Image (spheres, rainbow, N blue to C red):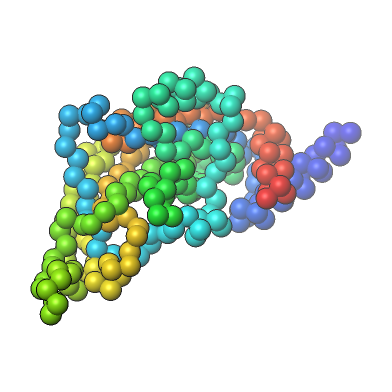
Amino acid sequence: MKAISLILLGLLCNTYVQANSLDSLDLNKARAYQAYVMTFVWPENMTSEDIEYQDIFSHEGIQPLADWSGENDGAAMPASSPFEAFTKTLSARTEVLSNKTWTLIFPDTGSSISESFHSAQAEHGYPVMTANITFTLGRYLESNLHYKHYQFGQPVATVEHQTQDGVMSPIDATTTNNASVYSSNSQVTDLNTAAYSSTDYNVWNGPTQVLPLHFINKTASKKLNYIDHPVIGTLIYFEPLDLEEAIDMVTHTSVAQ
């Protein structure tokens, strides 16, 4: 019976390895966790800090919701999640942007798993927030988060010129905007924006300003972590999983999709 269980576990491991492009999975080294990430935005009247958004001069990489259909953006958080009580409290005071969970299987210490997700809220078919997160298994569980929180409307720094019919319209220009990106480790990153097309602007319904954020968090499992920021708040929690249970969860999820 034990031999049969090991064979089945091996088959499940092979399925997971093929699905996630992993070369091998050593059952003695692999570790599994359920990761929970809740992201919310604070109301403007709950912060006294003035946070400036950057004007968007290039639409490259900005995807409408339809283009996210093939992305692995996690699963909605179950009602019995560790954040159940927090969800009720925060929903009454903040705007919860996303509530996601992933089953993570790390082949060995030092391995990483990357995921993408976006807010449930959207304007003109574009999510108001997009995010990429990389989980790394080391001495602690590390979360490397990259957020983009968007605003919609005319860019404040648009350069205009007078047309023949007297209507003001944006002109083509290459503009460089060096803006500070808020980071949890107090580092400053320069972002260079590309040329903004007047033709695209005339038909553009997507976001026109963005707040890029970068956070790095390290924690042990079974510890609630809060990442603070005047605009975006994040809760992170990791629950250890039995390896067989985790592989079974991943396999059934893949079959269901």
Query: Dividing the image into 4 quarters, which one contains the N terminus?
Result: top right
Q: Quadrant of residue 119?
A: top left
Task: Decide if residue 24 is in sight here.
Answer: yes
Q: Position of residue 25 (x, y in %)?
A: 65, 46
Q: Position of residue 95 (x, y in %)?
A: 38, 33
159 or 163, nearer to the observer:
163
163 displayed left or right of 130: left
Task: Decide if residue 108 is in sight here.
Answer: no
State the residue at coordinates (23%, 28%): 45
> Seen from this angle, which residue lies furthest front?
165
In the rendered view, would you say 168 is above or below 69? Answer: below
Q: In which quarter of the image is residue 178?
A: bottom left
State the residue at coordinates (31%, 44%): 214
State the residue at coordinates (18%, 45%): 52
> Seen from this angle, which residue lies furthest bottom?
164
State the residue at coordinates (52%, 47%): 73
In the rendered view, would you say 204 is above or below 216? Answer: below
129 displayed left or right of 34: left
Q: Position of residue 157 (x, y in %)?
A: 15, 58
Q: How many labels does the image show?
A: 0
203 displayed left or right of 103: left
Q: Position of residue 218 (x, y in %)?
A: 39, 33
75 or 35, nearer to the observer:
75
